Image: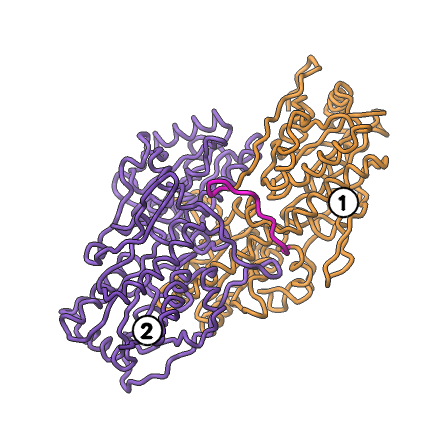
Chain colours: A purple, B orange
Amino acid sequence: MKKNAFYAQSGGVTAVINASACGVIETARAHRDRIGKVYAGRNGIIGALTEDLIDTSKETRSAIAALRHTPSGAFGSCRYKLKSIEESRAQYERLIDVFRAHDIGYFFYNGGGDSADTCLKVSQISRTMGYPIQAIHVPKTVDNDLPVTDNCPGFGSVAKYIAVSTMEASFDVASMAKTSTKVFVIEVMGRHAGWIAAAGALASTRENPLPILILFPEVVFDEDRFLAEVRKKVEKFGYVSIVVSEGLRNADGAFLAEAGTRDAFGHSQLGGVAPVIANLVKDSLGYKYHWAVADYLQRAARHVASRTDVDQAYAVGKAAVDMALAGKNAVMPAITRTSNSPYRWKITEAKLARVANVEKKMPKKFISRDGFGITPSCRAYLEPLIRGEDYPPYRGGLPRYVTLKNTPVAKKLDAAFEI
Amino acid sequence: MKKNAFYAQSGGVTAVINASACGVIETARAHRDRIGKVYAGRNGIIGALTEDLIDTSKETRSAIAALRHTPSGAFGSCRYKLKSIEESRAQYERLIDVFRAHDIGYFFYNGGGDSADTCLKVSQISRTMGYPIQAIHVPKTVDNDLPVTDNCPGFGSVAKYIAVSTMEASFDVASMAKTSTKVFVIEVMGRHAGWIAAAGALASTRENPLPILILFPEVVFDEDRFLAEVRKKVEKFGYVSIVVSEGLRNADGAFLAEAGTRDAFGHSQLGGVAPVIANLVKDSLGYKYHWAVADYLQRAARHVASRTDVDQAYAVGKAAVDMALAGKNAVMPAITRTSNSPYRWKITEAKLARVANVEKKMPKKFISRDGFGITPSCRAYLEPLIRGEDYPPYRGGLPRYVTLKNTPVAKKLDAAFEI
């Protein structure tokens, strides 16, 4: 019995979430006997609720293939979480109306922890509301905080970007340190977990050791110990690079980003922990500084994506369709590491109930005793995830990222639905 | 008569200044009959003044070749400007002492406008103080503000980085705009000239137009017109990317970066015009924003260097040695564009007196009438400069940048020299 599929992207996008879309769509196209069309939701689950569907069958084979090297969410993403069936039955009834109108039997949702929760709720429609649907979650998050899976697609590429950028900036500061900048601060994402900050430490290798100091959100900021460490590194190496998580907190639990800067009108919402740290160093130690805030650049940087990450992002998309064809519901393809050296991984099946709303923190054993670096076991975990390059094609000096036609599917329902 | 050569790097470093070093050293090595050793100054001219020289002949051929793909200044740079011979005769006497002690007859100085001035002053030693030396300036600056030369090595790569990053972040914001971020602000270098900011506009192409708004240092910031343009773009496209130069000023001539942010103690030196612009948009229009400050990441980003830039950086290094061998003094290899389409360029000879202390601004005809974008002639100028990719080799997911041995040359002078 041939059914159509729904696919949508949710939460913060990444350099490789479209590679997962590519995996889903190409695999579905390879099974036209069992899967009809893949309808993408415009802006995540909102597209399903508002019957704003995109007909991916209107896209050429090469356009879909180009998703593999295109960052961001090609169909639009959303920050929107479904309430429970008990709390908001009307939403689920609407989803069923839309699914039924478009003969949708497969639901693929591509996102992080919150999205896994949405996907889990949709998976329960079959049992509780009698509409037969198979809901499969496709993992994605630069925060690397999903449980069960060894790592999350999207993280490896942001980790590579931060490692490469930290290395490059460190070389720069080293050149300038004699008469100018001695301290470089880079602010990275990861409000609750220090996975991305940890990646900055990869820039220092045995072959080429660099003075890098990490400020994790997991480690309470201790100003005196921090300043002592900065001074020590500058005295030894002439300079230091500091990788600071946006989620760094002081002993009171307050974000340093919010504690610090105010604009001319006294507003405190500017954010930016990098300037706070840089200014503290300048005030206390007198070192000249530079600071950077990578923000979206880090998660959109498909130009320096990790090949491991791209391969895994594609693989979880493909596996999601395979699981659907095998009759599964309420599951997520997870990445299981079978060997560190040589690095080997395979796709396994995770129960969605074990994934949704669970946040995986950095294990304590991954943070060095002084709190400013990573341990060898952390390095062994991280290093394979940034391995390999996977450059997009270029024309005229710029990557040839694809913008899809995103042809709408004709609406079949009379009623509109307010979000 | 065989003489040794002195080579040094000066000012802010770039992704390709080492490619010029590679061009100088490899070309000198190819003329061992006429050029003895290449001694590099540790930290620019300071290395010459303090007799802190590096013997590049101790480096392997492959280490020197690797300079071509290594960002930053391999011998250390400096921010230090020589005074005139009249003002500071002792400095020049010291230089002559060092040059004579190490039999140095060629002086290659790799830098921007200030460094060209230093090089010009050294070139005058022959005439005014009787020590025979040939001084050749090797152009470098991300600011692209040297006169005579069509463009400056270092600029093409930072332009490519900003164009690629602006494109990637724009794709990201476009995905998020429905329920979240609608405005992305990226702050770029270029305090006096908007060349780097202009490069952000390259991200929008005829094939794939993106809503990008440039804030040039050449255009006085007009809050009302700016906000109207932001609103217009968001209403039309759903989002906007803003590329703002660190040198943006208001009608009073004050830098917006300094006018805006203060830390908790009331200090105003944090800098950062991106958060000021982002906050203004939020306060006035209510759009959710993200902002990034690329800082050193942009000029160190060898991983996404322009091949045109790398080729030109090498070529000016090579040409500097060729000019020295041809008996020249007080000159600089300049890049002359002979054709836009197809793009063709050649190396020509510029008199250093015409280069030193002259700053090339963006021509008015390169900025669009509304002041928020670039003209077709600007695009025609910029586009060839970011063309082509030139990836470094990687190992374990990271670029294999070289760190030289930097073996010191034994000192021959008894006296130390205070900087």
Q: Are marks 2 and 1 in contact (CB under 8 Å)?
A: no
SS under mark 2: strand
Are discs 2 and 1 located on one and the same chain?
no
Q: Count all numbered tags in the image, as a single digit.
A: 2
What is the three-letter code of the residue carrying label 1?
Val
Q: CA distance from mark 2 to mark 1?
A: 67 Å
Q: Residue at point 61% right, 34% down?
A: B74
What is the three-letter code of the residue carrying label 2?
Ile
Q: Residue at point 59% right, 70% down?
A: B206
The residue where tag 1 is placed is: B355
Hey, which quadrant is residue A223 in on the image?
top left
Highlighted magenta segment, given as a residue range = B386-398
Q: Quadrant of the N terminus of chain B?
A: top right
The residue where tag 2 is placed is: A35
User: Which chain letter matches label 1?
Assistant: B
Q: Which mark is residue B190?
A: none
Q: Residue at point 36% right, 45% down?
A: A344
Q: Taking B227 as reference, is B34 left or right?
A: right
Comparing B379 with B245, the one in front is: B379
Within 10 angstroms of label 1, few (less than 14), some, or many (20 or more) residues? many
On the image, the x and y values in percent for residue B288 come to: 38, 62
Q: Quadrant of the C terminus of chain B?
A: top right
Hey, which quadrant is residue B163 in on the image?
bottom right
The answer to whether residue B70 is seen in the rendering is yes
On the image, the x and y values in percent for residue A335 come to: 31, 51
Within 10 angstroms of label 2, few (less than 14), some, or many (20 or more) residues? many
On the image, the x and y values in percent for residue A106 come to: 28, 71
On the image, the x and y values in percent for residue A49 come to: 28, 75
Comparing A259 with B136, the one in front is: B136
